[in-house]
Amino acid sequence: MVHCLLIHSPGARRAREVVFSVLRDACIDGDLSIPEAIEAAKDIFAQNAIQFYKINATVRSFDSDIVVSRKFVEMETNATQNDIICTRIIWIDASGQSRCRVVPIQRFYDDVKKNGVLVSASCMGRTTVSISAVEGTNVSGTGVRLIPDLSTKWQIPWAKQEEMVLADMFLNPGEAYEYCPRGTLRRLLKILKDEFNLVMNVGFENEFYLLKSVLREGKEEWVPFDSTPYSSTSAYDAASHLFHEIINALQSLNIPVEQVHSEGGRGQFEVTLGHKVCDHAADDLVFSREVIRALARKHGLLATFLPKYILDDLGSGAHVHISLWENGENVFMASDGCSRHGMSKIGEEFMAGVLNHLPSILAFTAPLPNSYDRMQPNACSAAYVCWGKKSREVALRTSYSSESPDLVSNFEVRSFDGCANPYLGLASIVAAGVDGLRKHLTLPEPMDSGLNAELQRLPMSLSESVEALQEDIVLRDLIGGKLSAAIIAVRKAEIDYYAQDEEAYKQLIHIF
């Protein structure tokens, strides 16, 4: 436990929220009892006071639990609350949509912060268009509580009188809901840590189109913001006023931005996010999408992460870079002469598991029929079940650090798109990697040339990836049987709906 947290700094409120969230999660996971969490909190705050004020004193325990609990719950000053009108409580559903409940600020701090807000369980059984749970999801109509994760609460950069916070799903306070995406990811990360002492770090490449509204024959159409080429200075210059605000907003949310550039499609851009611990990176991806969409709207534009809005242009992905760490060191890099392909045995086994389960993983990372319009050969996107070092056509591609150009530092999953629920997408990757580690799987030889029709194609439709998931007992069991069944039912309903109208996908730009 770290005892030198500076909770007297201007970020005191934020620090206290983080302490509260960490200890709460430890209690929920069974790592700490409530009395142990209370003692830990007392130790942290007391040690911090001694160090900050340079007090020559010994830490003395408090007898009253009420004193300590007040430290947890009284985390906002009246002045701060008076500046805020309401709080958005955000969750991502099975279809990948970002949804929210909005509560007045006083109710949030009086009740919702601790007890959550009640929503229908059908929220995890809906498609992109349905208003209730679809057949086969088996989610009951009983209520589910959205409990705010206070470590993710921020003032909204584009709406200063509001806060936003991500939520976990519980049947009751302390009783986790097995369909919760964030809870599922954390559970699988715990398996990775407990069995192999590994931590997974993740970084996303956010690709999206900026569209503008035009009238054609009296009808509104959304067309590309510009038509300039890849990494064009003209493209960035035309949108720089927007990206200045996006970068500032992301940084205000503690989301690291590595770079911004125009992509190869007309009006297409990319914002690359820095690497973080897996579940925090998923949170960052959710917030980054909120930021980009909201600020684009502010400028009269529409930002869409839809995989293939313009069918004759490049698709948009959310390529994810994955590395494995142990005791603060990247263990993906080769460390001995027995390693192959410039990566460690651990790295190879994890990556081999992902490659082995990739057709099933697509049901989570490419969740819409439109996703498969992007993953075509010769389209700079994953199309084949293979891995390589340079080719943009392979499903998994290794990356190398500038300090060790011959050693793999991470690998990229290219079949992840902007409609995927990031928690479920990453959970499926962790589950596959765990299976690879348990079975000591090995990779085939890399493919960087000679990609042709003889190679195994990734699923060419959502139907094929759903079928692969139905047959993948190992992945379904690791994800959770009930949650996997719900995902399969939602995907089948999406297939049926979008098969009826080949133009229906265009409306998704207003959701994703």
Image (spheres, helix red, strand yellow):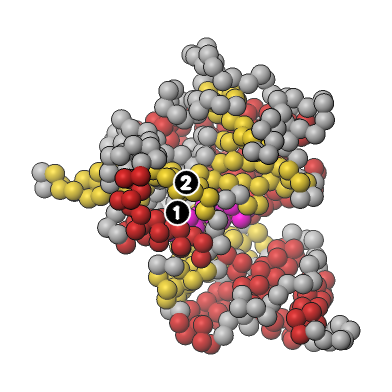
Residue 423 seen in the figure: no
Residue at horizontal 76%, vertical 46%? 329
Mark 2 packing: few (<14 Cα in 10 Å), some, or many (20+)?
A: many
- Helix, strand, or loop for circle 2? strand
Amino acid type shown at disc 1: Arg
Amino acid type shown at disc 2: Asn
Give the side of residue 343 with respect to residue 274, left or right.
right
Where does the image place residue 320, in percent across and percent down from the top left?
Answer: 56, 41
Span colored in magenta? 279-291
Residue 418 seen in the figure: yes
Q: Nearer the viewer, residue 310 or 485?
A: 310
- Helix, strand, or loop for circle 1? helix
Q: Which residue is mark 2?
A: 206
Q: Is residue 474 above or below residue 82?
A: above
Q: Is residue 157 above or below residue 230?
A: below
Count of marks, rendered view: 2
Q: Which residue is mark 1?
A: 289
